[in-house]
Amino acid sequence: MATIMIPTPLRKFTENRSSLESEASTVDAAITNLIVAYPALRQHILDSDLQIRSFVRIFVGDTDYAELQGISTPVDSASVISIVPAIAGGSSSQQPE
């Protein structure tokens, strides 16, 4: 079973679980199974066209799935799938007056 790592901001939607096991054979099936199990995650991971949101990165091991075979990237029992949402914030280019 592949392991799906849940980032801290999304754990409130997975009963505070930091990781989940998935019997899926592809990234797409793993994400689909995750959302079926925890429907509140859908709006945080998928857009209205059911595609991975542009600000969410999915890694298989240390490699972005987009650099592999995208959502069709195969996974197995040794695979670790990490969901990495972008973090907003940072410094502004404007200086306070």
Image (cartoon, rainbow, N blue to C red):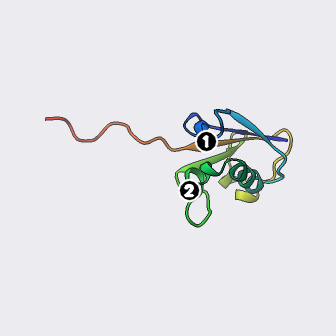
Point out the residue furthest to the left here.
97
**Amino acid on which the number 1 mark rests in the picture:** Phe
> Could you say which is closer to the camera, residue 54 or residue 4?
4
Q: Residue at x 75, y 38 (%)?
A: 20
The residue pinned by badge 2 equals 53
For the N terminus, give its image quadrant.
top right
- The answer to whether 81 appears left or right of 86 in the picture is right
Residue behind mark 1: 13
The quadrant of the image that shows the C terminus is top left
Residue type at mark 2: give it. Arg
Q: Secondary structure at mark 1?
A: helix
Q: Nearer the viewer, mark 2 or mark 1?
A: 1
Residue displayed at 51% across by 44% down? 86
Q: Secondary structure at mark 2?
A: loop
Where residue 53 appears, as percent x and y from the top left, is 56, 56
Above or below residue 27? Residue 20 is above
Could one spot residue 69 in this view of the protein? no
Residue 14 place in picture, x, y as percent: 65, 39
The answer to which of marks 2 and 1 sits earlier in the sequence is 1
**Residue 69 vertical placement versus 82 (above, below):** below
